[in-house]
Image (tube, coloured by chain):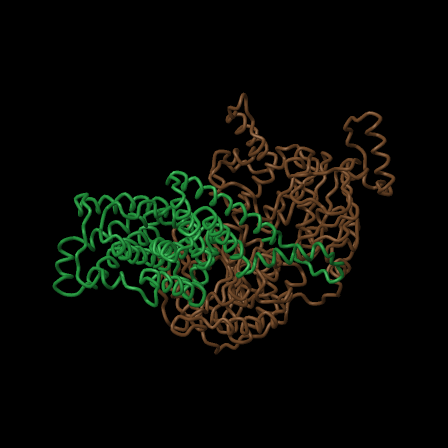
Amino acid sequence: MAQRLLAHGGLNGELAGAWSRARVLVDGSGRMTVAAPLLEVRGLVKRFPGVVALQGVDFDVRAGEVHCLLGQNGAGKSTLIKVLSGAHRPDEGEIRWQGEIAEFGNPTAAMRSGVAAMYQELDLVAGLSVADNVFLGHELSTMGFTRRAEARRRTRALLDRLGHRDIPPDRDVGRLSVAHQQVVSMARALSLDSKLLIMDEPSAVLDPDEVRVLFGVIRELTAQGVAVVYISHRMAEIREIGDRVTVLKDGRTVAAGLPAREVRTSELIGLMTGRVLENVFPQRVPVAQEAAEVLVVRGLAADGGFSGVDLTVRAGEVVGLAGLVGSGRSEILETVYGARKATDGTVEVDGRRLRRGSVGAAVRAGMGLCPEERKSQGLLLDQAVYRNITVSSLSSFARFGFLDDRAERTRSNRLTEALDVRPPGVDRVVRGLSGGNQQKVVLARWLLRECRVLLLDEPTRGVDVGARSEIYELIRDLAARGVAVVVVSSDVEEVLGLADRVLVVREGQVVHSGPADEIDESRVLDLVMEGHAA
Amino acid sequence: MSEDTVVTAPDRPATEKNDARRGISALLGSAAGRNTGLVVALVLLCLAGVVTAGDRFADLDNVLTILRLAAVIGVVSVGMTFVITGGGIDLSVGAIVALSSVWATTLATQGIANSTHWIVVVFTALAVGGACGLVNGVLIAYGRVVAFIATLASLAAARGLAEIISNRRTQILDVRGFTAFFDASVLGVPVLVVIFAVVAAAGWVLLNRTTFGRRTFAVGGNPEAARLAGIDVRRHTALLYTLLGLCCGLAAVMLIARTTTGSATHGGLYELDAIAAVVIGGTLLSGGRGTIAGTVFGVLIFTTLSNVFTLNNLSISAQAVAKGAIIVVAVLLQQRLARRSGT
């Protein structure tokens, strides 16, 4: 129904605003069958010390539509979301909510009006149960006593609606997988009876299967008149689920309300980047058969994760690990690196066997890891770029324990220039950089060490299209210089495009191993999910 | 803040007011500027001292007294700066000082010292302090006991042990050479004050110029990232507590020298004074940011405050209230600054 209404919803924004304002004056009843903008944003400006994050954003969201927000990291999407959800106050511009000027002074006010945001960094409280998290801040209570049975029942109903009967409402949220945590986050938004749901890269942590479930939920919500603002870097998803697209660049709207299904991908990328992108994945360089086997893993196993994993990576080779979230692919990587203790098997670098469960030994042997959770596992967020880069190579800058600060800065500067980290400056605090640039800083750390084996866990999560291809180039460059690379990604296209050889992991077992050009995406998905649906 | 907030804005018209405000917060945010507030506070305190107590405050002997008092707690606070910057906390410092002072002044230790050299007293105190710190560090880093609890346990145990060893009696020190050495002055500056200055300077170099210091920031800022970057976080944590233990041992030596006694009641509430000095100095309790200079100022402010109160015949209780107020104001100020600098 909502879809049909959209067809003739081409009202001029201002007119629609006036019209619905008048309507509010007349009866004030909340009939939601009108395609007038639910939310309308005009000339939004938001400044931070030293930076203008938004400098004129216009867009509108209609009830019952999926409105996609596109833009590179740093374009202002996250700030826009925070303004819409009341976490930041805009400096200029106006927000109209159901036709009336709205001031969401804080997230609670926005929530009460019906705007719920799901942030990229999930804001759940580990240690509390699923039900407690769903109703956090709006607990069901009678005279101050929480109605726990009722909360559990309603939570179960919400999870049911989201197609996740398998999540027990009593389970500690901290013990759920990231994907399941996201489902809880959505249940939380639904529990608020939201009219507008903002989702910041919800699919980044989901498997194809789970994305399908997510889309099912979104379709159901929009059919009920709920509007969704959907942020993703994946074009295919935008085509599948989106109704209209708004593109941001450098804090400005460069295109608003484009039809999501008709607009060409190249046009969107052009709008986002201001340039035309060609081949995303760099050319493969064939690996010489006689190239040395740098990383040799035999019979690796860890408790409750995986077992019998064999993996050989030659110098200059890129090996991709594909698998669902929870299949054990990240665990394999972390165990190879020594961050988790192996219960069985061996890891050798250049023929030398590594001590089990010792990151130090792995790093000394020439291994480097770019972890999955960049912010919590990879970076010293409040410290300078150069300190993040040199943290793994401190002894090479030290004489009798005394650091050569200047050499650290010079070497780091050379790397950040080569990797084109923006904005430049090695004394900048890492927290202020965008996702892609933060990833480059982590990569620079291992470039500086000139490591032999590079393990990359989700190297492009939260990285925009432009920076993404730069990171692919970088990985290929490294391989060309003889580094053995292992890439884990939930993006099958990425694994296939980037790797020379692909290993498919399912439920802790390697179920397939072979050259990347002899297998296609659907076959990988088949392998990944075989026995999964049953 | 959000990752989207960094957008280059070359064409933004800069208003003068904004520039001025940014200038001030940049000044306050810089290493030198952060300490300006502390300097101002110290100067105001001195002015208050001069106004209320006049010559009794501004007297050279009084200034040296302040410094001698500051020296002992100062050495502990420098060690505490490392532990807190590394993301930890140590509540047992006062008890470790007491235990070290008692152990270093037993009849047995004094006997050995008198038959060999007075340095035995110093080494005993350092060994006891270092060992206590090591126990704390191993419990916390390898035993994975929460720092707060582990050092709370050490607090009780160390003070209890000190009472057992000393039989709750104050032990008078009578070791040839010891008193003479520590009571001396270098160019008019008491040896205790010289020791504090050396420890502070060494602490600054260690924290800001060495791999050890850099690792401390990394471990305190994000232990998981530090671990995955190849730093042995557990060993480093254990080392931090050991370092603090050594500082406590040294403080015990200085306390013995100042009072010529060793006692299980020494070092009372040192943990609070040290943590307070570190925090008002600008070191983040959550770890990852720390400043030795700030700590030194923190110690001086507290000691001067006590002195001014004492000269005006105000009670210890009134001092405690004033200390509490200063801590609250300092932390509030820090938070406002942190917010304004936008991180």
Residue B195, percent from left and from top: 33, 62
Instruction: Give the chain ID for the green colour.
Output: B
A172 left or right, relative to A53: left
Up/down of B131 relative to B52, above or below: below
State the residue at coordinates (25%, 52%). B259
Residue A437, percent from left and from top: 61, 62
Residue B207, percent from left and from top: 43, 63
Quadrant occupied by the N terminus of chain A: top right
Tell me if I can see residue A342 in this picture. no
* A157 vs B60, nearest the viewer: B60
State the residue at coordinates (64%, 48%). A200
* A160 vs B190, nearest the viewer: B190
Instruction: Give the chain ID for the brown colour.
Output: A
A34 left or right, relative to B262: right
Tell me if I can see residue A303 in this picture. yes
Residue A319, percent from left and from top: 52, 66
Image quadrant of residue A415?
Answer: bottom right
Up/down of A28 relative to B230, above or below: above
* B144 vs B9, nearest the viewer: B9
Q: How many marks?
A: 0
Up/down of A198 relative to A499, above or below: above
Furthest-top residue in this view:
A143
A128 left or right, relative to A78: left
Furthest-front residue in this view:
B55
State the residue at coordinates (71%, 50%). A46
